[in-house]
């Protein structure tokens, strides 16, 4: 039996969602007390990044999907006896998963036979998106709800994101790094390199320039790839970017050559734009590489 796939908008699949039958529950981008816009519905990602570039001293925030937001969506499918899998941004960086979990319990009170699997992606943006796309593949291959959920929960263990940002001011404003570290790196103009693993942000150090931060990202990717190179054909790789697609395409080409030389692997590397929910915390110039094994 096919099931309905639901995710929060942090998966950054707004362009494909309708075509692939994915239902997105939006985050809101909060600019001030009077202006709060639903991601991809009331403000698109290009408009968002343009705003950041033109207003470098303004730091928007996000508001996560509420319990009611999820309950409203779940109830639509529960009434029609349609099973659901809901994939959420990492519970370690957002309360979206918690909202969905509580909403599930509320729906089961009214519809006891409803089938709703809530999955913590342990990631965000392009890697959360890869997990949702893997769920689409499983659904379209008629894998059962229970089996799909089990495979997806196993798959998240293989994921990594390696990234950097143009300025740590957004990370600091969003509470993603200590005040001392934020002031230090901002003062010195350093660029952090960060790994996301199991939902946690781990510092890989800092560099003095964008170019060196990209080299450090590639080195971190190379080290991880070295541990999985015999199975590299089973993995999906994506380059994520914010405002500058050209920079991302150059990184993709460099990564492709690096992997071809190191592993003799002819792998496909996609390029995807990082959405507003994560852009709030990274600013307009995030750049990273996500890796996830297929289920």
Image (cartoon, rainbow, N blue to C red):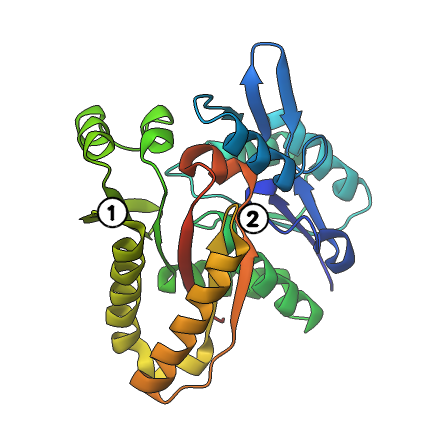
Please report the residue visible at 57 percent of the width from the left and 61 percent of the height from the top.
146
Q: Position of residue 30 (x, y in %)?
A: 56, 21
Is 119 situated left or right of 199 in this image?
A: right
Which of the marked residues, 1 or 2, is nearer the chain's N terminus? 2
Note whether residue 129 is visible. Answer: no
Name the residue tied to disc 2: 11
Question: Which circle marks residue 202 in the picture?
Answer: 1
Residue 46 found in image quarter: top right
Please report the residue visible at 40 percent of the width from the left and 86 percent of the height from the top.
265
Q: What quarter of the picture does the N terminus occupy? A: bottom right
Is 189 situated left or right of 167 in this image?
A: left
For the residues labelled 1 and 2, the Cα–Cα distance comes to 21 Å
Residue 94 found in image quarter: top left
Please report the residue visible at 32 percent of the width from the left and 81 percent of the height from the top.
229
Q: Position of residue 258 (x, y in %)?
A: 34, 78
Residue 255 found in image quarter: bottom left
Q: Position of residue 243 (x, y in %)?
A: 53, 45
Question: Up-down: is 93 above or below 16?
Answer: above
Please tell me which residue lies in front, 160 or 100.
160
Q: Position of residue 246 (x, y in %)?
A: 52, 58
Please report the residue visible at 23 percent of the width from the left and 41 percent of the height from the top.
190
Please tell me which residue lies in front, 156 or 172.
172
- Residue furthest to the right: 80
């Amino acid at each position: 039996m096919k099931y309905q796939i639901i995710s929060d908008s942090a998966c950054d699949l707004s362009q494909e969602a309708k075509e692939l039958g994915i239902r997105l529950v939006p985050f809101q981008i909060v600019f001030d007390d009077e202006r709060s816009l639903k991601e991809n519905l009331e403000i698109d990602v290009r408009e968002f990044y343009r705003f950041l570039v033109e207003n470098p001293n303004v730091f928007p925030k996000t508001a996560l999907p509420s319990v009611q937001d999820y309950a409203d969506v779940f109830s639509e499918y529960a009434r029609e006896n349609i099973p659901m899998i809901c994939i959420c941004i990492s519970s370690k960086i957002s309360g979206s998963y918690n909202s969905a979990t509580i909403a599930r319990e509320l729906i089961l009170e009214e519809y006891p036979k409803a089938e709703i699997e809530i999955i913590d992606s342990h990631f965000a943006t392009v890697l959360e998106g890869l997990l949702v796309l893997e769920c689409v593949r499983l659904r379209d291959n008629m894998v059962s709800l229970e089996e799909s959920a089990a495979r997806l929960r196993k798959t998240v263990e293989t994921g990594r994101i390696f990234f950097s940002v143009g300025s740590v001011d957004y990370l600091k404003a969003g509470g993603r790094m200590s005040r001392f570290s934020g002031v230090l790196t901002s003062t010195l103009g350093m660029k952090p390199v960060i790994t996301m693993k199991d939902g946690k942000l781990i510092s890989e150090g800092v560099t003095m320039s964008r170019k060196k931060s990209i080299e450090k990202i590639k080195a971190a990717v190379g080290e991880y790839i070295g541990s999985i190179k015999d199975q590299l054909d089973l993995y999906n790789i994506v380059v994520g970017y914010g405002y500058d697609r050209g920079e991302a395409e150059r990184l993709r080409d460099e990564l492709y050559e690096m992997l071809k030389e190191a592993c003799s692997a002819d792998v496909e590397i996609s390029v995807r734009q990082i959405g507003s929910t994560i852009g709030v915390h990274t600013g307009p110039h995030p750049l990273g590489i996500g890796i996830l094994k297929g289920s």
